[in-house]
């Protein structure tokens, strides 16, 4: 049996975390069964029913991170990306750095994309720091402003069900270990590095 967990986990559209045992297994919270469902051993997605005898549990910091994201959204009363305020319009899943991140059902995140050409069932980091499967497209608008596009953000079910590309997480791991990051969030460092190109990301909002 699971310990009593905050109701916010039930209210999200989905909550995905990594299993604390390691090995890359992901866990999906099931409000119906009030238990964690492991990812399928082969292919994408998760098992549909609790596995008898399975005792996989999330890392404490990922679970607390998901709860903190719920508290923050409820406190702000509006999502800065999609403009909606209900937890049911959002979900939590690990970002490319392995940290619990908030995603929107109605507004894809341009930092989570498919591979170039849309093949495969791995999510990729939409960044110049990501792997070679993500190809940047550059263009200039009528005002002579330069933009870069890494592809359309994945739909919510793919962000939930697909694993991260190992090369993208490896690249993110190298960024996180860079001494220049210091005490900052790796995302702050990425924003600084990408900002030096003076080329804005498209879509405009992150």
Image (cartoon, grey):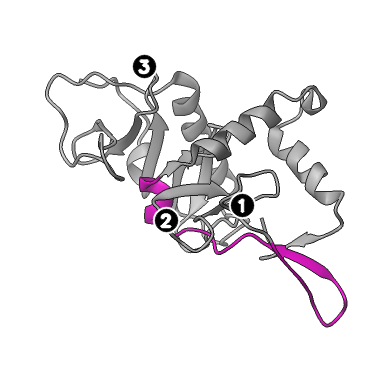
- The image shows residue 101 at horizontal and vertical percentages of 53, 40
* Residue 143 colored in magenta in the image: yes
Dividing the picture into quadrants, the one containing residue 55 is top left
Q: Could you say which is closer to the camera, residue 189 or residue 146?
A: 146
Task: Tell me the residue at 52%/60% (across/down).
Answer: 108
Task: Tell me the residue at 73%/63% (across/down).
Answer: 148
Dividing the picture into quadrants, the one containing residue 99 is top right
Judge left or right: residue 157 versus residue 175: left
* Residue 41 colored in magenta in the image: no
Q: Can residue 78 be seen in this view?
A: yes
User: How far is mark 1 from mark 3, CA to CA?
Assistant: 28 Å
Judge left or right: residue 204 versus residue 5: right
- The residue at the far left in this view is 52
User: How far is mark 2 from mark 3, CA to CA?
Assistant: 26 Å
* Residue bearing mark 1: 126
Give the magenta-colored segment's residue range. 137-162
Q: Is residue 12 visible?
A: no
User: How far is mark 2 from mark 1, CA to CA?
Assistant: 15 Å
* Residue bearing mark 2: 156
Q: Residues within 10 Å of mark 2 (few under 14, many from 20)?
A: some
- The image shows residue 62 at horizontal and vertical percentages of 48, 27
Q: How many labels does the image show?
A: 3
- The image shows residue 33 at horizontal and vertical percentages of 18, 36
Q: Earlier in the sequence, mark 2 or mark 1?
A: 1
Q: Earlier in the sequence, mark 2 or mark 3?
A: 3
User: Of tags 1 and 3, which is closer to the observer?
Assistant: 1
- The image shows residue 161 at horizontal and vertical percentages of 35, 47
User: Of tags 2 and 1, which is closer to the observer?
Assistant: 1
Q: How crowded is mark 1: few (under 14 residues within 10 Å), some or many (20 or more)?
A: many
> Element type at marker 3?
loop
Q: Are marks 2 and 1 in contact (CB under 8 Å)?
A: no
User: Of tags 2 and 3, which is closer to the observer?
Assistant: 3
């Amino acid at each position: 049996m699971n310990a009593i967990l905050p109701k916010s986990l039930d209210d999200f559209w989905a909550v995905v975390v990594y299993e604390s045992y390691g090995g890359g297994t992901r866990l999906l919270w099931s409000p119906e069964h009030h238990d964690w469902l492991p990812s399928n051993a082969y292919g994408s997605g998760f098992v549909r029913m609790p596995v008898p005898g399975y005792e996989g549990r999330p890392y404490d910091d990922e679970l607390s991170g998901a709860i903190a994201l719920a508290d923050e959204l409820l406190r702000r009363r509006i999502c800065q990306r999609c403009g909606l305020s209900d937890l049911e319009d959002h979900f939590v899943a690990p970002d490319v750095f392995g940290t619990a991140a908030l995603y929107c059902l109605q507004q894809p995140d341009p930092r989570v994309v498919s591979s170039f050409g849309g093949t495969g069932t791995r999510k990729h980091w939409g960044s110049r720091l990501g792997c070679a499967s993500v190809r940047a497209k550059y263009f200039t608008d009528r005002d002579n402003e330069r933009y870069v596009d890494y592809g359309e953000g994945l739909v919510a079910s793919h962000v939930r069900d697909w694993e991260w590309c190992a090369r993208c997480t490896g690249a993110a791991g190298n960024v996180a270990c860079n001494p220049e990051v210091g005490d900052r969030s790796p995302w702050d460092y990425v924003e600084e590095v990408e900002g030096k190109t003076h080329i804005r990301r498209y879509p405009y909002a992150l």
